[in-house]
């Protein structure tokens, strides 16, 4: 899937990303980076709003799993089940989130469990760089759930 196709999915499926100005900065099948401009995502203290940072983290992880699901042709919903975020330093520049796809063996186990049980989970690490590397670090658990009804992707 191309970065442009992912941008269309985000725009149509998650309207908040449009308000935040989220754009796909990079995707190569292994690493995903989303970016959002600082100005519409800042708070009254001159740093990025924690809610914008959290939303960008959640969307980045969701997009990574959604891309893997689509590449595999699975009919599943992707939902976030758990999020733990640490805000280690203020972000005062463009918000850039980064997520790497887990190793092949972890993804194969995810898909196998989904095909067997109709539900499977994977944990991802997502970071946002600020003035220092890893200004925001998150561990998130996403779940693939078999859809109860068919729909177009």
Image (cartoon, rainbow, N blue to C red):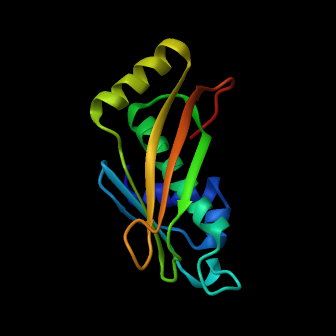
| Depth order, front residue of 18/130 | 130
- Toward the top, the furthest residue is 116
Q: Position of residue 141 (x, y in %)?
A: 53, 39
User: Going 37% across and 70% down the picture, which residue do you hit?
Assistant: 133
Q: Position of residue 112 (x, y in %)?
A: 41, 19
Q: Position of residue 4 (x, y in %)?
A: 43, 61
User: Going 59% across and 27% down the picture, which residue do you hit?
Assistant: 145
- Numbered circles on residues, count: 0
Q: Is residue 118 above or below residue 6?
A: above
62 on left or right of 79:
left
- Toward the front, the furthest residue is 88
Q: Is residue 15 above or below residue 110?
A: below
- Toward the right, the furthest residue is 44
User: Going 59% across and 77% down the picture, which residue do you hit?
Assistant: 48
86 on left or right of 5:
right
User: Going 53% across and 58% down the picture, which residue do you hit?
Assistant: 8
Asked which quadrant contains residue 52, the reply is: bottom right
| Depth order, front residue of 109/63 | 109
Q: Position of residue 40 (x, y in %)?
A: 64, 81
- Which of the image's four quarters has the C terminus? top right
Q: Is residue 58 above or below residue 149?
A: below
């Amino acid at each position: 899937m191309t970065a442009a196709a992912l941008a269309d999915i985000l725009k149509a499926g998650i309207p908040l990303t449009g308000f935040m100005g989220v754009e796909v900065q990079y995707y190569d099948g292994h690493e995903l980076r989303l970016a959002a401009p600082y100005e519409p995502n800042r708070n009254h203290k001159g740093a990025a709003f924690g809610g914008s940072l959290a939303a960008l983290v959640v969307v980045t992880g969701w997009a990574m799993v959604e891309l893997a699901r689509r590449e595999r042709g699975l009919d599943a919903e992707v939902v976030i089940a758990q999020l733990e975020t640490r805000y280690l330093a203020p972000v005062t520049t463009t918000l850039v989130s980064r997520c790497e796809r887990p190793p092949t063996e972890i993804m194969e186990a995810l898909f196998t469990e989904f095909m067997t049980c109709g539900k499977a989970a994977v944990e991802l690490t997502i970071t946002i760089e600020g003035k220092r590397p890893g200004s925001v670090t998150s561990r998130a658990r996403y779940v693939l759930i078999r859809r109860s009804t068919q729909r177009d992707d």
